[in-house]
Image (tube, rainbow, N blue to C red):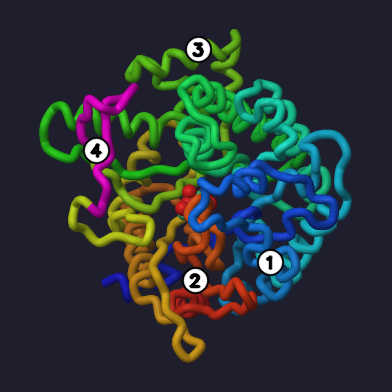
C-alpha cells in the first residue's frame, strides 16, 4: 500500500526536504577563525564517543557544500534544513563576528537559492561555543542574552534571504543527554544542572522566536521537539503511571510552556524544583506563538514501573529485549508512532501547523559495485510518510516531512557506525553514493 504513495497525495505546498546539522557534517572544526564548541571539546574525552571518533572533518561539507547542494537539486529535494554553527560565526560565543564564518553561510545560502533549494535554518543544533560553557553554558541564565545576540547576528546577516527559521533542535535531548545523563556534550550530570538548562533553553526558545519576529518581517518561525509515542509495557496501573511520567518528560516538557500552559509541574512533583531557577514573570516569557512546530520522531517507547529509577520510577524497556524489528540504534521500527504524535500534538488548543522536521533510520549498508541497496531504510521512509498522510487525512494540519538525513554522518556519541543517510559517504575519500532510498525519494519528488 505504501508503494503507491505519490507526492500529490500530500497536497500542494507540502514541504518535503532533508535535515542536516552543522557539527555532524561540516568538519573544518578549527578553520577560518571558527572557535571551539562543546562538541569539539567533548570528543577529546576518550570515554565518550564510539571508538574515539570525532567530527573534525566529518563529511567535509564546509568544502563540499556546493556539490552536495547540487546533489540535492539532482535528487529533486527543494528544502534543506541545516544548522548554523554558533562558534563559526561568533568564535567566543558573543562579541566579535567572524566574517569568514558569515561568508561560509552566505555561500551556502546563495548556492542553495540558485539551485532552487529553500534554506530552513536551525539556529541551535547542540554545538554551544565552549567559551560559553566555560561560563556555565545552558545552566547560566545569561545564556538567554548570549543566544539572542547570536540569533540577532544570524537574522541581520542572512534574514534578507532566509525565510524559515528553527530556533532550537530538540531541547529535551540536549538538556537531558548533555546536562542530566552526561552522555552528550558538555557531559554534565544531575537534576540541578538539568532543570537549570531546561528552563534557560525554554526561555531562549521563546525569546529567540520573539526576536526573529521583531527583526524579520514575514519570517516563518518554528522550533523542534524530539518525541516518541509511549505505551505502558504491561496493561497494569503501575506501568500506566510510569508511562505517563515518561510521556510528560519526553513529549510535553518543552511544548506546554511554549503554548502558554507552563511546565507540567503538578503531575510530576520533582519538576517543582524548576521553580528554584525561575524568576517572577518567567511563565509569560516562556510562551511564544510559533508559526509552526517541528516534531522529530524515530520510534516508540514502552515504559514500565521501576523502583530503581530515581525521580520518575519509570524505565524504558529496550527494543532489543522485546523481539521487535530494530534499527542500528536499537530503536523499534514502529511507523504508527509518528501518526499518534501528530494526533497528540494537534490536539492541544492553539497549536500551530506541524512539520515533521526529522524522520529516518540507521541501518547497516553495504556498498557493492558502487551501489548501495537499502530496502529497510526505503521501507521505513515509505511507511512513515504513509502514517503522516493518514494523520493529515484525519484533519491534522501537518505541512511538511523532512528526512533525517542527507549524508551518512557523525551520529554524536555513536560516532559513524549508525548510517542514517539517503546518500552513502566514504569518510576516507568523501565519495558520495546515492542509496536506493535516495533514488526512490528523488523519483517520488519529481
Ligand atoms: C537529532 C539528530 C540525530 C538524530 C538521530 C535527532 O535527535 O536532531 O542530530 O542525528 O536524531 O539520532
Magenta span: 304-320
Quarter of the N terminus within the rendering: bottom left
- Mark 1 and mark 4 lie on one chain; the one further toward the N terminus is 1
Which label sits in the foreground, 2 or 4?
A: 4
Secondary structure at numbered mark 4: strand
Q: Is residue 348 left or right of residue 71?
A: left
Label 2 – label 4 distance at C-alpha: 31 Å
Whether the magenta-drawn stretch holds residue 44 is answered as: no
- Mark 4, residue position: 303
Q: Residue furthest bottom?
A: 369
Q: Which residue is mark 2?
A: 422
**Pointer 1: what residue?**
60
Of labels 3 and 1, the one closer to you: 1
User: In the figure, residue 139 lies in which quadrant?
Assistant: top right
Give the mark nearest the N terminus, 4 or 3. 3
Q: Does mark 1's beta carbon lie closer than 8 Å to ligand 1?
A: no
Give the secondary structure at mark 1: loop
Q: Residue at image x 61%, y 20%?
A: 285
The answer to whether any part of residue 399 appears in the image is no
User: Could you say which disc has been placed on residue 275 in the image?
Assistant: 3
Amino acid at each position: 500500500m505504501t508503494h503507491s504513495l505519490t507526492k500529490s497525495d500530500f497536497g500542494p505546498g507540502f514541504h518535503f526536504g532533508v535535515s542536516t546539522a552543522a557539527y555532524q557534517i561540516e568538519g573544518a572544526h578549527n578553520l577560518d577563525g571558527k572557535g571551539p564548541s562543546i562538541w569539539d571539546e567533548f570528543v577529546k574525552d576518550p570515554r565518550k564517543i564510539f571508538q574515539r571518533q570525532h567530527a573534525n572533518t566529518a563529511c567535509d561539507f564546509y568544502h563540499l557544500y556546493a556539490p552536495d547542494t547540487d546533489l540535492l537539486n539532482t535528487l529533486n529535494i527543494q528544502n534543506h534544513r541545516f544548522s548554523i554553527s554558533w562558534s563559526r560565526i561568533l568564535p567566543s560565543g558573543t562579541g566579535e563576528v567572524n566574517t569568514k564564518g558569515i561568508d561560509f553561510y552566505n555561500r551556502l545560502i546563495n548556492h542553495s537559492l540558485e539551485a532552487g533549494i529553500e534554506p530552513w535554518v536551525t539556529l541551535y543544533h547542540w554545538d554551544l561555543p565552549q567559551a560559553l560553557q566555560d561560563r556555565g553554558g545552558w545552566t547560566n541564565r545569561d545564556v538567554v542574552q548570549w543566544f539572542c545576540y547570536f540569533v540577532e547576528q544570524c537574522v541581520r546577516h542572512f534574514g534578507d534571504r532566509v525565510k524559515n527559521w528553527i530556533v532550537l533542535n530538540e531541547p529535551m535531548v540536549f538538556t537531558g543527554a548533555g546536562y542530566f545523563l552526561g552522555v552528550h556534550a558538555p557531559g554534565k550530570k544531575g537534576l540541578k544542572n538539568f532543570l537549570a538548562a531546561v528552563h534557560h533553553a525554554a526561555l531562549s526558545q521563546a525569546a529567540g522566536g520573539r526576536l526573529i519576529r521583531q527583526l524579520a518581517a514575514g519570517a516563518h518561525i518554528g522550533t523542534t521537539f524530539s518525541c516518541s509515542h509511549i505505551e505502558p509495557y504491561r496493561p497494569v496501573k503501575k506501568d500506566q503511571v510510569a508511562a505517563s511520567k515518561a510521556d510528560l518528560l519526553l513529549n510535553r516538557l518543552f511544548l506546554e510552556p511554549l503554548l502558554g500552559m507552563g511546565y507540567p509541574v503538578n503531575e510530576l512533583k520533582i519538576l517543582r524544583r524548576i521553580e528554584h531557577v525561575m524568576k517572577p514573570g518567567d511563565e509569560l516569557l516562556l510562551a511564544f506563538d510559533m508559526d509552526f512546530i517541528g516534531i522529530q520522531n524515530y520510534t516508540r517507547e514502552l515504559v514500565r514501573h521501576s523502583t530503581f529509577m530515581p525521580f520518575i520510577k519509570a524505565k524504558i524497556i529496550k527494543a532489543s529485549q522485546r523481539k521487535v524489528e530494530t534499527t542500528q540504534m536499537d530503536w523499534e521500527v514502529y511507523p504508527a508512532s509518528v501518526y499518534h504524535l501528530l494526533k497528540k500534538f494537534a490536539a492541544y488548543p492553539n497549536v500551530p501547523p506541524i512539520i515533521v522536521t526529522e524522520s529516518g533510520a540507521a541501518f547497516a549498508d553495504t556498498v557493492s559495485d558502487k551501489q548501495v541497496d537499502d530496502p529497510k531504510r526505503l521501507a521505513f521512509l515509505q511507511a512513515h510518510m504513509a502514517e503522516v498522510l493518514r494523520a493529515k487525512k484525519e484533519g491534522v494540519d501537518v505541512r511538511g516531512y523532512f528526512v533525517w538525513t542527507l549524508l551518512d554522518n557523525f551520529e554524536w556519541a555513536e560516532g559513524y557506525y549508525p548510517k542514517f543517510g539517503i546518500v552513502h559517504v566514504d569518510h576516507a575519500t568523501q565519495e558520495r553514493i546515492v542509496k536506493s532510498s535516495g533514488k526512490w525519494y528523488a523519483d517520488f519528488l519529481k
